[in-house]
Amino acid sequence: MGNEVKLTAGALVRNTELLSFRPQVYDSGLLDFFGLSGATGTYDKATGSGFGFQWKQKVDKGNPFLSFDTSYISARGFADSSIGVFSEDSGINVTTQLGARGQNWGAALAYRYGSAGSQVVRDGNMAAGLQTLSAVTGQSSNSVSIGAFWEPTGSSWMPSISAGYGFTDISGAVSSSIPKQGNIQSWMVGFQWKDVFQKGNSAGFAFGQAPFASNATSEQSSERFLWEFFYKYQVTDKISITPGIFYAPSYQAAVGDSTWGGVIQTTFRF
């Protein structure tokens, strides 16, 4: 609608796809955590029926601009007609982001409200009462995050820097014996270099703390680090090969365990 406003509505949409930009340039394609600015409570990839509003300031090319985005996603209502997309039990996700971006930098402040049925975060490292993928009936969540990035304008020994922090508050008791309340925090820092050894290739390293519970009703609120390293080799304009190694707490593992491994990712673009 005009030069600055974009409206989106659909039976199956995702909140992270209804943002003018995400506040990072670090892009490995490996651990999902590092692709979400270390703030998986805010950028929870809520998917369902919904609509979004995006405003992006119109400026001359290359000049800094402001943006404002907000979306409403019902994660459960589209699959169950007895619930409906506007019921508190339909997994409501209301995500809002205010951002500023320049030619080689960007920053954003974001907020997400989640009702019962909305995804909180995916991580077994949290306290026992917070390991659920979704808030349950009687609960709600409020998540805030801040993220920023900077990158050199050309190839340089200096890497781009992306950083993000997220905080989520879960409130509402399921029962007197299982309160399932607490605060969740997480953060990440990522570095990425351009034209490493050869033009078009890139390398990167990221580390941070997976979502951990503080002020929780369980003793299992340990703080754990995770990291990854990758090198992207651009074979042709359309094909790239990216070997990488990673270390993550409790990802695809039992609670209290850790996972590390390697992967070779091949990407074809047409």
Image (cartoon, helix red, strand yellow):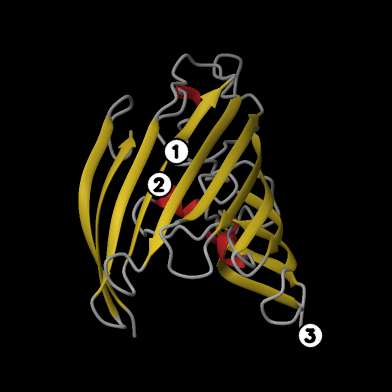
Foreground disc of the pair 2, 3: 2
Residue in view at x 48 percent, y 44 percent: 189
Front residue of 67 and 74: 67
> Is any part of residue 90 visible from this angle?
no
Q: Which residue is mark 2?
A: 206
Q: Which residue is mark 1?
A: 208
| Residue at the image position 21 percent from the left and 44 percent from the top | 261
Query: Label 2 amino acid?
Result: Ala
Residue 118 lies, in percent from the top left, at 58, 46
Could you tell which of marks 3 and 1 lies nearer the N-terminus? 3
**For numbered disc 3, what is the local secondary structure?**
loop
Left or right of residue 102, residue 153 in this image: left
- The image shows a total of numbered marks equal to 3
Residue beneath the point at 33% across and 80% down: 269
The numbered disc on residue 2 is 3
Query: In the displayed structure, would residue 189 be above or below residue 202?
Result: above
Q: Nearer the viewer, mark 3 or mark 1?
A: 1
Tag 3 and tag 1, C-beta contact below 8 Å: no
- Does residue 19 appear to the left or right of 250 in the view shown? right
| Crowding near the residue tagged with mark 3, few <14, some 14–19, many ≥20 C-alpha atoms within 10 Å | few
Q: Amino acid at mark 1?
A: Gly
